[in-house]
Image (tube, helix red, strand yellow):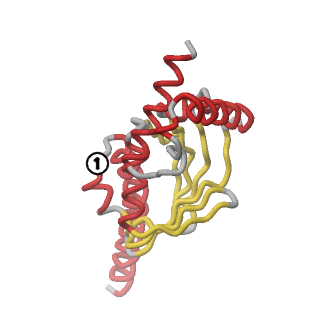
Amino acid sequence: MQKSIISLLFILIVFFSCKERISKIELVKKYYETLNNSDFSNVSSLLSDSILSKEVKYKMMFSHEDYLELLKWDSTFKPEYKVINISEEDEIIKTKISQKDKRILFLNEEPIITNQVIRFKNGKILNIEIVDYIVFNDSIFIRNRTKLINWIDINHPELKGFLHDQTKKGGLKYLKAIEFYQKANK
C-alpha cells in the first residue's frame, strides 16, 4: 500500500512538472503570437509588472506600461516573429527567433535572427534577453540608417527625431520617413 502511494505521488509530481514545462513554452509561443497580431490586451496578461530587456550588452528595465508602449511602437512596422526553435532548460526558455518588419527589411535588408533567453516570475514573463545575433548585418544596417537620417534631415526636417521616439506616434513618423525615402530613391 505504501509503495502504491509513493508511486502515485511520483507520477503526480512528474505530471505536474511536465505540465509546468509545457505551460512556459506555450506562454512564450503565445507571447510571439500576440506580437504578430498586435494583441495588446492579451500580451499584457503574459507580462510581469516590470520587464527587463537585455540585448547582448544593452540592458533596460521597463514598467509594464512602458513596455506595452514599446510594443505599440514595434507594431507600427507590422512585425512577423517566427519561433524557429524553443526549449526549456533550468527554469528558462531558450528560443531562436526570426523577426522581420518594414523597418528591419529596410535597414537590415533581411530578417534578423536572434537567440533569446526568457525568464519568468510567478508564471509571467520577467526578462527577455537577446543573447546573440545569428543574422544581423551591422554594416548594412548602419549604412541604411545613416542614409535615411541624413536624407530626412535635408528633405523632411519635420520628421527629425523619428529614430528616438519609440512610441506609436514615433513609429508612424519612422514609417513615413522610410516611405518618403523609398519613393525618392527608386
Q: Which percent across, then down, holds residue 144?
A: 65, 31
Q: Which percent across, then down, holds residue 176?
A: 43, 32
Amino acid type, label 1: Asp
The residue shown at (54%, 62%) is: 53
Q: Which percent across, then down, holds residue 31?
A: 38, 52
- Residue 172, image quadrant: top left
Secondary structure state at the residue bearing disc 1 = loop
Location of the N terminus by quadrant is bottom left
Location of the C terminus by quadrant is top right
The residue shown at (42%, 61%) is: 67
Nearer to me, 54 or 123: 54
The residue shown at (54%, 35%) is: 104
Nearer to me, 11 or 28: 28
Look at mark 1 in the image and give the residue it sits on. 39
Q: Which percent across, then down, holds residue 118?
A: 52, 61
- Residue 94, image quadrant: bottom right
Specify few, some or many for label 1: CA neighbours under 10 Å numbering under 14, 14-19, or 20 or more.
some
The residue shown at (42%, 37%) is: 77
